[in-house]
Image: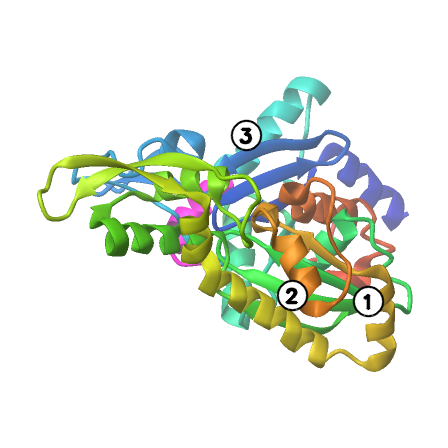
Amino acid sequence: MFDRIKNLFSFLSLDMAIDLGTANSLVYVKDRGIIINEPSVVAVNNKTGQILAIGQEAKLMVGRTPSYITATRPLVNGVISDFEVTEQMLKYFIEKAVAESKKKFGFLGYSPRVIIGIPCGVTEVERKAVRDAAKNAGARTVFLIEEPLASAIGANLPIQDPGGNFIVDIGGGTTEVAVISLGGIVTYRSLKVAGDKLNDDIIQFAQKEYRLLIGERMAEYIKINIGSAMPLKDKKEVPMRGRNLITGLPEEVVVFNDDIQRALERSVNQIVSAIKTTIEETPPELLSDVMTNGIYLAGGGSLLRGLDALISRETKMPCKIIDDPLTSVVRGCGIALENIDTLANLVEKDEEWGAPI
């Protein structure tokens, strides 16, 4: 009887998965797929404390606001740095997903069940902050899953089998390196070198080489267009615009892919070093599986040109970028939530797990 009631309440509510990323947040709704993909940016009026914009609208304000408005990211290195703002951002995403689903399915009577991806190695306090923020934002039940597990599920890797699955998830704030077997993480490394650090490397390069102050948006544009982990055969160039630190006047210089590759070299080497360290800590039986199956790359940072070839060269193992690496975490979270009974061992259950309301 309880199961029938539970299924009825689940039907009337909404299940959603959230990839609460440092750079971008994605929301996956059961039976609908990914319906929200927006920057994790919130614009706040410092005088009144009012939230002015969230997501793409707020990102357009970065670096362009008057002194009393701040457009910031409430998450740093994959964890919450501003609880109240994160709560408001989650509330916005949940309400938007519920509103869009109501248009299609009609009445939805109960608050949603939510699963959220978190980095490996976060503290209990940080886990509780994510859970509390989601509950305060309107979630009925909250599940947490570690991002490498979610990425592996999203990539359709056989993580429940007794074999080694090596995944590297390079996000905006953190890089997660993990070996997974029998539905659990055997060994992992989590480092705060990822997409944001690569942007910062380009900003520092511009200041050191050209005495040019550029913004984060320009740095990201350069990284996406000509950034690489290894020297490229074809020469690429883009204009880099900013303010000359000596004259104080606007200036434009042309930068080439070789310059940016050298600027990113140190951070890229740190990621490769973390992968090598994880390999050293992997049990031999699992390592033999990894040598056969290869290393899988996920996350937006995996799209850096030549990164897969560099990792393959340095580790002497195959390296592959999974399909649609930008959405692997949220897709994996969605699959885990849709199959919560069979994949229950992979998620951290809410203390109210199983309650229908």
Nearer the viewer's eye, disc 1 or disc 3?
A: 1
The crowd level at tag 1 (other Cα within 10 Å; few <14, some 14-19, many 20+) is many
Assess whether residue 197 is covered by the magenta stretch: no
Magenta residues, dominant SS class? helix
**Secondary structure beneath label 2:** strand
Q: Taking 64 as reference, is 259 left or right? A: right
The crowd level at tag 2 (other Cα within 10 Å; few <14, some 14-19, many 20+) is many
Q: Marks 2 and 1, how far apart in space?
A: 13 Å
- Image coordinates of residue 162 in percent, x first then y, are 91, 69
Q: Taking 65 as reference, is 256 left or right? A: right
Q: Nearer the viewer, residue 71 or 287?
A: 287
Q: Nearer the viewer, residue 325 or 121?
A: 325
**Secondary structure beneath label 3:** helix
Question: Which residue sits furthest left?
Answer: 247
Nearer the viewer's eye, disc 2 or disc 1?
A: 1
Which label number is shown at residue 177?
2
Which label number is shown at residue 290?
1
Which label number is shown at residue 96?
3
Residue at point 59%, 66% (across, down): 272
Three-letter residue code for mark 2: Val
- Image coordinates of residue 77 in percent, x first then y, are 47, 59
Give the image quarter of residue 131: bottom right
Image: magenta residue range: 80-91
C-beta proximity under 8 Å, tags 1 and 3: no
Earlier residue among tags 1 and 3: 3
Residue 209 can be seen in this image: yes
Residue at point 58%, 32% (across, down): 36
Residue 114 can be seen in this image: no
